[in-house]
Amino acid sequence: MLKVGLVGLGFMGNAHLQNYIRLEEEGFPIKLVAIADVDEKRQGGALVEGNLPTGITPVDFSKYNFYRDMETMIESEELDYVDLCLPTYLHEPLAVKAMEMGLHVFCEKPMAISTEACERMIEASERTDKQLMIGQTLRFFPSYQYVKEAIDSERYGKVVAASFFRGGTTPIWSWENWLLQKDKSGGCLLDQHIHDVDTINWFFGKPETVSTSGLVINEGNGYDIVSSKYFYEDGKVVSAEDDWTINSDDFGFEMRFRVNFERGTIILENGKLVDYPHGEKSFEPDISKENGYYLEIKHFAESILNGTPAAERVPLACTKQTITIAEHEEKSADKKGELTVVEVS
């Protein structure tokens, strides 16, 4: 039976909490035993809602031991791993500390606030021989896995173009407004756009160069709107946009993509995945309706139980590279879209 400590009970912490409850109800050998959060109101069950449906259901918080900090929780409980749902700038120091204290770590995306911080996390995992996996959840969503299989198998030939979009309301719900502080979150580019940066890196590998335009609406936020183009040796046309300023009362959130192949196109829009083979009728693929948050947590837990490397699905070198690509996008945006060579260590 795996024993888990959840660190951070904000918007994503609640999403993870709901999936631990579900796993326990399904009889999976896992138990969330403790929660650490600096906000004492959350110890009384105050949950944070954001811009995504996370399946909020009533929670009996009396089942969990609460702590104000992770270190005290680890010292007081017998845990197998911690699940970090914290502001981005805290990912590296607390992940490293938890591994040094003897625990495996599942850490929410993005990996860290900088490439250098990512490198310190990887070094700590190797040094302590503890598992570390980053929650780049789109790698677990069935719709994205469907496209990845089409790319790898080349069943429609090679990719000729791809575009990605995500956007929604400005995230004003975070603890002490950390999401709108560039030094803590990296802004829209590193917090939200990073999903599509990672997807592009996973689907196609590192681009040779990038060109990004961005807009800062409120000083100190980092970029609130970004639009990037990614250039590859084979010439495929790849772009991604993100906008977290769509503050209509009824918009909510949307993520969509279009991937064009030599002999077909796959589109996700309005929550529906449609496959368009050239010269044939389109169809909706018969894929799992399961959500990626559930699948990624279950995968990490199974990896610990089975002694298999969790990061094979989400390699640490690759998630570090995703951060590096994003950093080069920011450099390009700072120079009004100047074409920037993506260099990785």
Image (tube, helix red, strand yellow):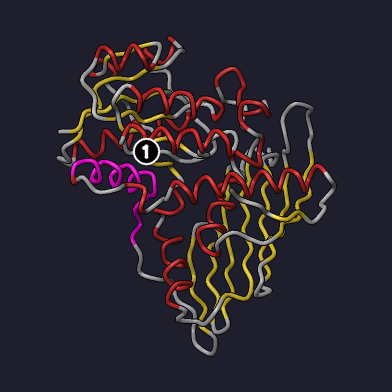
Would residue 313 be counted in the magenta stretch? no
Q: How many marks?
A: 1
Q: Main secondary structure of the magenta part?
A: helix
What is the x, y in percent for residue 52? 50, 40
Q: Nearer the viewer, residue 104 or 38?
A: 104
Q: Amino acid at mark 1?
A: Glu
State the residue lying farthest toward the right: 336
What is the x, y in percent for residue 303? 25, 45
Q: Secondary structure at mark 1?
A: helix
Residue located 58% across and 83% down the image: 262
On screen, residue 135 versus residue 73, left or right, reads right
Label 1 Cα neighbours within 10 Å, binned few <14 / some 14-19 / many ≥20:
few
Residue located 27% across and 14% down the image: 65
What is the x, y in percent for residue 121? 46, 34
Above or below, 314 relative to 260:
above
Would residue 290 be counted in the magenta stretch? yes
State the residue lying farthest toward the bottom: 279
Residue located 47% across and 30% down the image: 11
Residue at mark 1: 126
Q: Nearer the viewer, residue 260 or 198?
A: 198
User: The N terminus appears in which quarter of the rendering?
Assistant: top left
Q: Give the residues drawn in magenta, as a range.
A: 288-305
Residue located 54% across and 90% down the image: 279
Q: Nearer the viewer, residue 345 or 305?
A: 345
On screen, residue 84 versus residue 221, left or right, reads left
